[in-house]
Amino acid sequence: MSEPVELKCPRCGHAWKYSGSLSRYGTVCPSCKSWVPIPRDLRRIPPSQRIRRGVSVSCPRCGHEWVYSGAYLPLIYSGKVVMIMCPACGKKIRVKIKQQAQTTASP
């Protein structure tokens, strides 16, 4: 356990003193059960846990940025369009990897 830090839910505005582990990316709001990120400068995540395979996503509504590494990742890598939910505001976002143009050399 660590010294309590003040967190505020971006969805419902509930503020509380969080005294759980800071070796995680966030926690759940005790009021509305939505995801509340722990500020980067307060996190104590070991370097081995920071490297994860995923797709960088940015929410067009709230600007929240994160690396998506959930169950739809294989579909995204295969080029399919997938709808995922922003963990900060709940908006559904279309995600598709932009394919790089392949060039073939002619003999």
Image (tube, grey):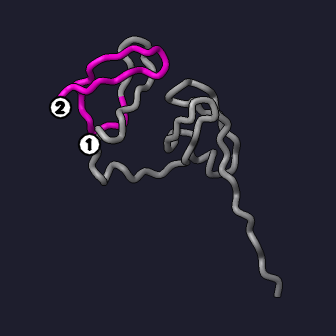
Query: Where residue 36 sits: x, y (%)?
Result: 41, 26
Main SS of the magenta part reads loop
- Residue 69 in sight here: no
Check residue 2 in the rendering and tell me which mark sits there, or answer none.
2
Q: Position of residue 2 (x, y in %)?
A: 17, 31
Residue drawn at (43%, 50%) of the image: 52
Dots 1 and 2: beta carbons under 8 Å?
A: yes
The residue that label 1 is drawn on is 44
Q: Position of residue 88 (x, y in %)?
A: 50, 28
Instruction: Establish if 21 lies above or below 101.
Output: above
Q: Amino acid at mark 2?
A: Ser
For the point 29% across and 38% down, which residue is it?
A: 42
Q: Is residue 3 left or right of residue 95?
A: left
The front one of 96 and 65 is 65
Determine whether the residue tagged by mark 1 lies in a helix, strand or loop: loop
Residue range of the region highlighted in magenta in the rendering: 1-26
Which mark sits nearer the N-terminus, 1 or 2?
A: 2
